[in-house]
Image: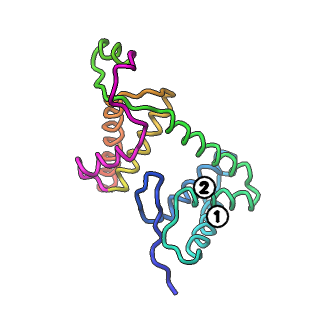
Amino acid sequence: MVRSQLHVVKSDGSIEEYVHTKVIGTISRVLSKVGADSVYLAEQLTDVVTYYLYNLENTNKITSSEILSIIIAILTETGYEDAADTLNEFHLRRRFKRLRTEVISINIQEISDAEALADMEQFEKSYQWDKSRIVCNLTEKYNFDVPTARMIASMVEDRIFSLEITTVPTSLIKQIVLSEAALVMRAQKQLQTV
């Protein structure tokens, strides 16, 4: 019996199709961080993850955190505990950064805007970092497809978190979104001309 497409429930509640190559990318990146840089090994371990997921009984949906747990378990059971630890640490660090990063609705253009940002108490409109807001904006306002919007949002999140700041003005987010979107659109155009 052939199973229907497996769907992944993301941490923001959205649902997308399970993509085997995303797991290959995750495993490949974490293996390379611990000196076991092998795409073949990543593919073999991903085959195990995918096989396990598609053989779970009575489910066609699984959460992204459950997939993460399965990847960590498989890495551990196959002798790659250091890769499992690295992946778990990365995931926990990113979760922590998401919890401690606050977005402030301000357009920084002048030093007076920066002074206003320094006086945090005046801001009523702030919210916790949530990259799904970027995805929604890109899909609804600019007609990007969901996978491309998610990729751009992830790139933006990586850039924001690398700055090690906990208060982010919306104007900075907008500039980084535009920069990353330009990179993606340039890459897509280059692929079309090949």
User: Which image quadrant is residue 5 in?
Assistant: bottom left
**Residue under circle 2?**
27
Image location (x, y in percent) of residue 60: 49, 72
Of label 2 and label 1, which has the lower sequence position?
2
**Residue under circle 1?**
45
Query: Of the numbered discs in the image, which one, if any, rests on residue 78?
Result: none
- Front residue of 35/148: it is 148
Identify whether 112 is placed above or below 29.
above
- What is the CA distance from the residue labelled 2 to the residue labelled 1? 8 Å
- Front residue of 53/40: it is 53
Amino acid tagged 2: Ile
Image location (x, y in percent) of residue 99: 51, 37
Region rendered in magenta: 118-145
User: Which image quadrant is residue 108 in?
Assistant: top left
Neighbourhood count class around disc 1 (C-alpha, 10 Å): few under 14, some 14–19, many 20 upward: many
Image location (x, y in percent) of residue 104: 36, 28
- Front residue of 28/156: it is 156
Q: Where is the C terminus found, in terms of image quarters?
A: bottom left
Query: In this rendering, would 164 be left or right of 104?
Result: right
Look at the image and say whether residue 122 sits in the magenta stretch.
yes
Determine whether the residue tagged by mark 2 lies in a helix, strand or loop: helix
Look at the image and say whether residue 134 sits in the magenta stretch.
yes
Amino acid tagged 1: Leu
> Residue at position x 24%, y 52% from top?
143
Identify whether 162 is placed above or below 108.
below
Residues at marks 2 and 1 touching, judged by CB atoms closer than 8 Å? yes
Determine whether the residue tagged by mark 1 lies in a helix, strand or loop: helix
> Residue at position x 48%, y 26% from top?
165
> Residue at position x 49%, y 68% from top?
61
